[in-house]
């Protein structure tokens, strides 16, 4: 059993996995990693099962020390780091597996959220209601604290790396509905460039922009189920886009719902960012799901041993920084 | 009315029986869930009833929308099942500090607080749905002569296990949270326990009756699980 000590917990760092499914009828949100693609990639790089628990970093990254090694970390996201081994510092890039030996210390910087840190075999924390995902509001799972001890399996095999997964760009694609809106309101919603307000979190993104007109039926509906990606339009005409910790039911009319292929992209939308929406139909949503699967499969094909990389040559040619830290 | 299946993105959908808070519509939603539970179709992951609808989460690559739609049409014919939920007989205490809105609610209905409480304790509520917070149950069945609307300005913090009413419904807050319902008491009973096999006290289809207790009994009961 390998062990990591949390020297500094970072900010907005929590333990997440694929999510907590099967309890929405009891009002328990699904939670889980906001970017499931990055999350699974971190697990692959760490040598952990795809759905193992990992650290999600939303504001800044932690400082970790290997108390008992070897531990392989999988780094997915815009991290840069300094590895201190036997008194010597070494720069570390992201999108790789990194084996820490006993005594190694890794200080990570998060250039742009979200970032995921996975551990060999997966973080060993007890599941609550079939999931290790933190949902602070109900005291499920937990956030990372100072001096926490994280347990995982010993690292096996060699460190591997892969090019960064692109989060994707362009408008967020959505299926209109389930609630009816006048065509001119839908058009205004699509034409607008929305700004993400600061009071956004894992529950949802609050957007600011042109005030959308009231529906003839009013903004409120009889409460019914919602899901991550649902775009609610409350009475003030400013959309709320639900994310993984979003409540399971809501009383605001929904103009649409972001398609599954684009849900991960909502993790990359930060306060102050601009966001726009584009409507698609079910066939386009299905095509987008297929393309997402193909991208993930291609990324897995590109995994290569870290040892095989001439890192210094790449650095000197400025290939790594350009590829990894471009926003 | 024939139910409609409305897409909620490409991996969830809503079966809507109507658009009102109405026990008959909720009974159809509950019956629909019972029919799903009896024979869950392949590709359907999860479902949750609401007042007048059921939300379905499914894998569109295993269960296409059109197939889900015809399945729903078939299942919607299921006759409302006799209520099979649990009956909860729950204590609540209405001492002044637990029930800051009781006097207003009673007065608005031309009742004394004691008369309001006595009438309230005779009602059997139905758990129409859960939502808002883990374990937060919307209990239908509050008669008009005991009712009051939601507060114009919600409280920033409603204490955990507050019992509240608003707009023809009753609820109890499993966690402390902001809230706009009117607080008429507090229960010593734990409403949410993540470590329990059944994490929430209430489930859709359950029924609830409230029994008035005094302050001493409240703290005695709270100590049984709080230590």
Image (cartoon, coloured by chain):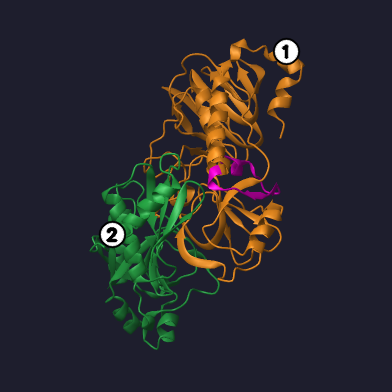
Q: For the residues carrying marks 2 and 1, which lies nearer the camera in this image?
A: 2
Is the Cβ of the residue at disc 2 closer than 8 Å to that at disc 1? no
- Left or right: B226 in relation to A71: left
User: Distance between the Cα atoms at labels 2 and 1?
Assistant: 69 Å
Q: Secondary structure at mark 1?
A: helix
Residue A221 coordinates in the image, percent (x, y): 50, 66
Residue drawn at x 45%, y 60% as measured from the top left: A224
Is residue A269 inside the magenta stretch?
yes
**In the rendered image, which quarter contains the C terminus of chain A?**
top right
Residue underneath mark 1: A313
Q: Quadrant of residue A269?
A: top right
> Front-most of B111 and B114?
B111
**Tint of chain A:** orange
> Front-most of A19 and B182?
A19
- Residue B187 visible to an observer of this rendering: no
- Left or right: A229 in relation to A274: left
Residue B55 coordinates in the image, percent (x, y): 42, 55
Q: Please say if A194 is above or below B129.
A: above
**Tint of chain B:** green
Q: Please say if A157 is above or below A58.
A: above
Q: Please say if A92 is above or below B56.
A: above
Image: magenta residue range: A264-283
Residue underneath mark 2: B78
- Left or right: B151 in relation to A235: left
Task: Report the chain holding disc 2.
Answer: B
Q: Please say if A261 is above or below A212.
A: above
Is residue B194 inside the magenta stretch?
no
Q: Secondary structure at mark 2?
A: loop
Residue B206 coordinates in the image, percent (x, y): 28, 62
């Amino acid at each position: 059993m390998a062990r990591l000590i949390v020297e500094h917990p970072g900010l907005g760092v929590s333990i997440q996995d694929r999510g907590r499914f099967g309890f929405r009828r009891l009002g328990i949100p699904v939670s889980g990693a906001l970017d499931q693609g990055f999350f699974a990639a971190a697990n692959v790089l760490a040598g952990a099962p795809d759905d193992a628990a990992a650290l999600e970093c939303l504001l800044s990254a932690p400082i970790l020390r290997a108390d008992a090694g070897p531990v392989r970390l999988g780094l997915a996201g815009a991290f840069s780091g300094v590895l201190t081994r036997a008194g010597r510092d070494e720069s570390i890039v992201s999108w790789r597996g990194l084996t820490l030996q006993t005594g190694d210390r890794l200080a990570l910087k998060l250039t742009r959220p979200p970032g995921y840190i996975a551990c060999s075999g997966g973080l060993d924390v007890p599941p609550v209601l079939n999931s290790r995902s933190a949902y602070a509001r109900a005291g499920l799972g937990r956030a990372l604290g100072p001096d926490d001890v994280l347990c995982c399996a010993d690292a096996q095999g060699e460190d591997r790396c892969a090019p960064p997964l692109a989060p994707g760009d362009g408008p967020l694609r959505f299926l209109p509905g389930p609630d009816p809106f006048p065509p001119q309101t839908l058009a205004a919603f699509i034409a607008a460039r929305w700004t993400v307000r600061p009071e956004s979190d894992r529950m949802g993104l609050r957007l600011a922009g042109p005030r959308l007109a009231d529906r003839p039926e009013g903004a409120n509906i009889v409460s019914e189920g919602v899901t991550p990606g649902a775009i609610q339009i409350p009475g003030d005409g400013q959309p709320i886009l639900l994310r993984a910790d979003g409540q399971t039911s809501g009383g605001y009319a929904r103009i649409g719902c972001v398609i599954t292929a684009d849900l991960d992209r909502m993790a990359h939308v930060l306060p102050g960012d601009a966001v726009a929406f584009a409507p698609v139909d079910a066939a386009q949503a299905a095509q987008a799901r297929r393309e997402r699967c193909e991208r993930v499969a291609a990324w897995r094909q590109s995994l290569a041993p870290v040892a095989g990389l001439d890192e210094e040559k790449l650095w000197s040619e400025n290939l790594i920084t350009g590829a990894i830290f471009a926003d | 009315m024939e139910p409609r299946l409305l897409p909620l993105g490409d991996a969830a959908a809503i079966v809507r029986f109507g658009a009102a808070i109405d026990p008959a519509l909720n009974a159809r939603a509950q019956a629909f869930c019972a029919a799903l539970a009896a024979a869950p179709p392949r590709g359907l992951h999860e479902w949750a009833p609401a007042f007048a609808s059921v939300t379905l989460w499914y894998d569109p690559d295993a269960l296409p929308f059109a197939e889900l739609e015809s399945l729903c049409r078939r299942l919607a014919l299921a006759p409302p099942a006799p209520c099979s939920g649990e009956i909860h007989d729950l204590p609540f205490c209405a001492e002044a500090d637990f029930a800051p809105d009781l006097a207003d609610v009673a007065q608005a209905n031309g009742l004394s607080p004691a008369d309001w409480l006595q009438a309230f304790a005779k009602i059997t509520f139905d758990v129409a749905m859960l939502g808002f917070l883990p374990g937060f149950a919307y209990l239908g069945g509050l008669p008009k002569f005991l009712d009051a609307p939601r507060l114009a300005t919600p409280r920033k913090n409603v204490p955990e296990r507050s019992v509240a009413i608003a707009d023809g419904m009753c609820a109890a807050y499993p966690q402390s949270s902001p809230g706009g319902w009117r607080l008429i008491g507090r229960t010593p009973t734990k409403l949410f326990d993540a470590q329990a096999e059944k994490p929430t006290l209430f489930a859709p289809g359950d029924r609830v009756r409230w029994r008035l207790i005094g302050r001493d009994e409240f703290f005695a009961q709270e100590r049984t699980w709080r230590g």
